[in-house]
Amino acid sequence: MRRWELIAGGSAKFWQIGRDGASVTVRYGRLGTAGQTKVKDFGSEESAVAHVDKLVAEKEKKGYRSDGAEVAAPPRVAEISATAASEPDTQAVRADGAVPDAPADVLSPALVTPPWKVERAAPKPIAVDVVVPRGFEWEPGEREQWAKASCYGPSSGIGVDYGDQDWRVAVDRLCKGELRGRDVLAVVAGAPEDVLRPRLAEWEPVRDDYMGWERVLVARFEGEVLPQAVRIAKSDATYLADLLLPFADAEVAALMADWLVRVKRLRDVAELWFRRHPETAARALLPAALGRQGKVRRAAEVALWLVAEHGHADLVRRVAAEHGEQVADAVDALLQADPAGHHLQARVPVVGSWADPALLPRILVRDTRYALPAAVTAHVLTMMALSRPDDVLSLLTMSKPDDVHRYVEVVRAECDRESLARFGWAVFEAWRGEGMPSKDRWALSAQGMVGDDETVRALAPVVRAWPGEGAHPRALIGLRALAAIGSTAALLQLNGIATKSQFGALRSRAAEMIDTIAEDRGLTAEQLADRLVPDFGLDDAASLVVDYGPRRFTVGFDKRLTPYVADGDGVRLKALPKPGVGDDQDLAAREYRRFVQLRKDVRTVAADQVRRFEAAMVAGRRWPVAEFRELFVAHPLLWHVVRRLVWVTGDGVSFRLAEDRTVADVHDDVVDLPQDAVVGVAHPVHLADCLDGWVGVFADYEVLQPFAQLSRPVHVLSEDERAASRLKRFENVAVPTAKVLELARGGWELSAPEEGGIRYSVGLSVPGGTVAVELDPGVPAGQPSMTEPQRLAEVVLRGRRTFGELDAVSVSEVLADLTRLTT
């Protein structure tokens, strides 16, 4: 029987067919399962052959692909295999039609013998004396954010307008442990420094409803409160470990190394700390990394590997060299060692029976002439199992797309990447079929090792859906897998989750990962997103040729960015014809599948980019002219979006892009953009003097805009509102909860749940502050779609004194959102 597989759009299925005389046997099902078998007799051999050919053609048109594996192949299929084997540089086949095992001389020793199979002697300890200076380092804007007190008002008699003596009494009660919750916040945030600072050393905070005071404490006193910060972080590390991120200290370094290898839920925080303080980590952990064998040494070694993986290997070596040649050589050997082989010989995971190689597609070598033998395939499964997310080595093997341990590099180099990805996805589907046991979550995380863009297309929708199914931790592992694949398609999906996911925690984690990836490339998250838009193989004319062999078609895009198809004579067709009898069957089937996938991908990407340009207009984002031309004007897909918008320079000159990609003003005169200019999407506020003119130009040229730009209403404040911090015209208005949730999906954010899981406000970030709408009775976290109306108790600007201090675009957008909410 010959085997075909379909892996696309969340599906992972196999289909097999064989013929024995007039009898045809079909087996089908999900990858990783035995599937179902059906046998049918056709009365004659000729009818059976015709039926086999018909079914094969239908499956291939649907996107099924053959992996070449056969057992007792029927004559027609065997003939195909024999023909392929006779052609130069094609896949080798055995007499029975199956791809043969690769002979020993084809595979490298590194592939046959993985690192965990190599015996290694334990290194001898070396004593090192170090002095680690204490330091403190904030990220941009971090201190200001932490300093914002989240006190909800006085309690137990403690307010914020106290005389000196009253503050001394309050601080005394704080040090005696008599205060809790918001009372602690009131003292930490409000007590004069000359009253609170002298008493800090005697205060031993206890775990309580912290109400955000711990970050206010660190923001006010920084390194002076290290003992309190360590005590607080240890008391509830799950929620407060990140309190230690600004501290550069030996005790914190040891704690982070321990969390890195021992507590999986704290690894992200530990990794962030090591990214921020690489030199402190190198100095503080050097003695333990070269000390006696044990858990402390292992933690220090893994931490130094992580620091090196993040681009600081030379720094670690420089610190080691300060302590002599012996230490320098030992550290150099440590950094060159393979983490997987260094620690895992004694604890190589056992792969479950559900991942049976006999039920999985075979992995081909690079030239596809041979397949991996069973023993080497077992090594690949072990390699995947070593990526399990509860093991710290996943940080080293998947932290960046190019920083994978050596055996993964060998597998990628010597195996056909497409068949490797199909094998990996089949393992994932087999795991899903087994009920997704948590101990085998490596089947998910390993997609980052072996996956490709087809994996990305199938995995991303699953990751998006998991939080809604109560599987948020699993979704986070999926995010890491997408980041580890690291292709443009993978990062595009990751960025989409970071900006559009309805689940806040998933969205925040994806945004953090995008920020880290962007930082590694010397970009901001927005700049990275600009560079992730695929061109889909379109030419300079923004078209694509679909080649069926005898027939060729051209794909273009209309004003709505919907693909259209024209035949060889330029006549538009209703749809791309399916491959016919006279076409090159293999080529036409591939091209048809490519077009179907292109249509789906373009629809998704175009919608995302339209949203991004609208958000850039509202935020007032600007691009240098060179980037504008390279990233947008020259891009074969984005060109269709940017030419339908009005743009403006930093000097207020508005322009559009003509059909020939030249720049024209509202009078259709050519505009010469200076090379040092910056440009952005014009908001109607910027076009007050020429808005009507632009409306006329776009009407004359019949240009359909991708979103409401020229037709966007402009809202302004009254004189009283300009001088106030509240918008009373919207207060005490009752609105459906559904409209509040719609506002939250449009860029506003619901506040964190408080007592009873109630969210009492929804807010929008504006330059220098936040517009907050206080809700009564509030939105329950577990029942956001409740029907009880919400009264807008207060609409207030926080962080600035008056609404008049905001720019005109922010004012217009806020007023537009609130008008839609209340009407």
Image (spheres, grey):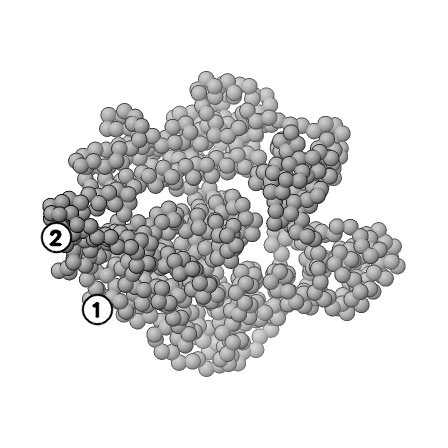
Q: Position of residue 76 (x, y in %)?
A: 13, 49
Give the amino acid at mark 1: Ala
**Is disc 1 surrounded by few (<14), some (14 to 19) or many (20+) residues within 10 Å?**
few
Give the CA distance from mark 1 to mark 2: 38 Å
Q: In this view, does 678 lie to the left or right of 351?
A: right
Can you tell which mark lies on residue 181? none
Give the image quarter of residue 238: bottom right
Would you say the residues marked 1 and 2 are in contact, meaning their CB atoms lie under 8 Å apart?
Answer: no
Give the amino acid at mark 2: Gly
Q: Residue at x 70, y 65 (%)?
A: 207
Nearer the viewer's eye, disc 1 or disc 2? 2
Q: Which of marks 1 and 2 is nearer the N terminus?
A: 2
Residue in the foreground of this view, choosing between 600 and 303: 600
Q: Is residue 75 left or right of residue 636?
A: left
Residue in the foreground of this view, choosing between 227 and 500: 500
Q: Is mark 2 on a helix, strand or loop?
A: loop
| Residue that numbered label 1 is attached to | 104
Q: Residue at x 38, y 58 (%)?
A: 433
Q: Which residue is drawn at 75% across and 50% down?
A: 152
Q: Which residue is drawn at 74% across and 58% down?
A: 181
Q: Position of residue 395 (x, y in %)?
A: 47, 63
Q: Position of residue 793 (x, y in %)?
A: 73, 39
- Residue 198 visible? The answer is no
- Residue 536 visible? The answer is yes
Q: What element carries label 1?
A: helix
| Residue that numbered label 2 is attached to | 21
Residue in the foreground of this view, choosing between 552 and 661: 552
